[in-house]
Structures are given as C-alpha cells and as structure tokens.
Amino acid sequence: MLDKINTAKKRILEMRPEDVVNLDAYPIADRDDPRRAALVARLKQELDQNQYVSLPDFIRPEARLRAVADAEGALPRAHHNCSERNCYLQRKGDPSLSESHPINMFLSASMRMLAYDRFNEDSPVKTLYHWAPVREFIAEIVGSETLYDNADPSQPVNLVCYKTGDRSAWHFDSVNAFTMTLMLQASESGGDFEMVPNTRSDDDQNYDYVAAVLRGERPDDTVSVAREAGALCVFRGCNSLHRVSPVEGDTMRIMGVFVYETAPGVVGDPEVNATIYGREEAVG
Ligand SMILES: O=C(O)CCC(=O)C(=O)O
Ligand SMILES: [Fe+2]
C-alpha cells in the first residue's frame, strides 16, 4: 500500500526530463537533429584537447532550484567526509620512499556527501541521470560504445555539499575514465574547480612534476574551470590532477556527481562506500 502511494507521489512530483534538461540549448533528444551532431563533434574535440568540457545552462533554472532544495533538505543525513589522503586517494604512504615523494604527501579534504539513497527519489538530478538521451549523448562525447547506469544503492548520483572552509585536495580519480558533475549552486567565492591537464600519462607517473604541483609550484599550468550554476562538466580526471579550492562565504557549493559505467550491474565495494558515505547506522 505504502509502495503504491510512494509510486503515485513520485509520478505526480517528478519533473519531466524535458523540463529538467535545457533542450533549447542542447537538442539532445532528437538523434536526427543536425545541431546535435555538431554539438557532439565540438564537445568531443574539446574534451580530447583540454581533458574537460563545460556545458553552461545544461539544467533549467526551476529544476536546478528543486535540486538545491533537495540537497538542503537532506543535509542532516549527509556524511561529513573529512580525510587526509595522498593524491592517489590512499590514506597510507610508503615508508620505503622519501618523505617528499607524492605517495607520502598528505592533503586534507572536507565535504558533505549525500549518497543516492539519502535524498528525494523524484529529484531532478535523478531524472536527468536516468534519461536515456543524456546517457547516450555523454557516451558519444566520451567515445564509449554504450554507457549504463551504476547499480549501487549509494553511488549513481551524489549531491556533494561544501560549506565554508570545505575543499577537496589535489587528486587523480581512480576508477572511471571520465567524471560528470553538475554545478547546482556556486559558492560566493572560492570553490574553484582547478585542473592540471595531463599531469601524468598511462605509462609515466611523472612523480617529480606531480610533487611540484602538490607543493604549489605550478600555478601557470593550473586551469580554473569556469563553473556557473547550471553548468555540466565532463572531465578526464584519471591522469589530470584536480581539486576544489576552499569555499568561502555563507552560500554552500552544491555539486551533483554522476557515475556511468561501461558494463551493466556495477556496484561498489561496501567497505569503500562506508568510508565515503558513512555507515547506515551512523547517520540519519
Ligand atoms: O566538485 C568538483 O568540481 C569536482 C569533484 C571531483 O573531483 C570528482 O567528482 O572527482
Ligand atoms: Fe575527482
């Protein structure tokens, strides 16, 4: 009975995908539209060249405001993820290496993580994520044959909230070949998404250069990606160090983070999930 009511409620409250995605600026639903083909070609080329691509005004204003309200309403259920990590996302160094080796350089990060199952079922960010035209559009940009939704209870879409002083430290993303984020609310200042494109490559760890970036010695190689509220960003974070600079001011930076997979049925490791999202019993 309750399930039926919830399903009916979701149907009434959920926005249509067409009202979430700004189809006027991004005509992604019609595969035969020549504007779609031109858009894909441009974004694909930009991603290859810069390692990131930004799509301003991807979400419509009303949908964005609803997603902001979803994050604010669920915030008491967020896990305050506060950690010391190296840029390889490890909490332990290697004592056989020197103290100045990047594996032994620890940086602190602080953010509030809302797992998929901790915020509204009918949130516009979930509607956007599960809509096939978005998934197919992104697959074409990143050059993947097919993408699938992640099947984990926590991982598919997260709302990551940064209050004043929160930040993420320089890191390489580990698992996925690309990452997709949507700026829902920008902070007054700080909270910049910074990236050093191609810091390493698949066959060269480039440790000396990585260490120099971590020590703050390569400001000229750092790109600050403009992120207005509503902008979608697709980036390759595996070989390009990136971070979010400390947030300043009272406006919370709220970021939607989306995980697509190249195979169906992918779920996360429960232990890893517990460190990122907190344990079920510890929150809520
Ligand atoms: O919040 C951001 O802009 C970047 C987040 C990030 O580094 C990631 O999701 O891998
Ligand atoms: Fe990242």
Image: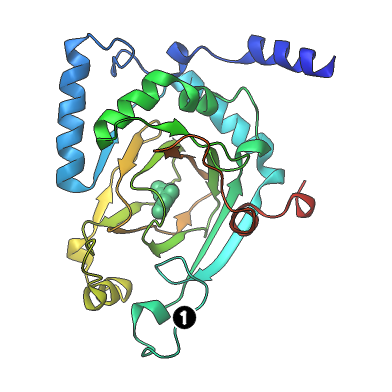
**What residue is rendered at 55% in x and 46% in y?**
161
Q: Which part of the image, by quadrant, shows the N terminus?
A: top right
Q: Is residue 166 above or below residue 284?
A: below
Tag 1 residue:
93
Query: Three-letter amino acid code at disc 1?
Result: Gly
Q: Residues within 10 Å of mark 1 (few under 14, many from 20)?
A: some
Give the image location of residue 134, x and y in percent.
38, 23
- As rendered, which of 151 and 72 lies closer to the eye? 151
**What residue is rendered at 43% in x and 12% in y?**
18
Q: Is residue 66 above or below residue 234?
A: above
Give the image location of residue 67, x and y in percent.
55, 29
Q: Left or right of 244: which side holds 124? A: right
Q: Left or right of 242: which side holds 42? A: left
Q: Left or right of 178: which side holds 183? A: right
Colour scheme used in the picture? rainbow
The answer to whether residue 205 is visible is yes
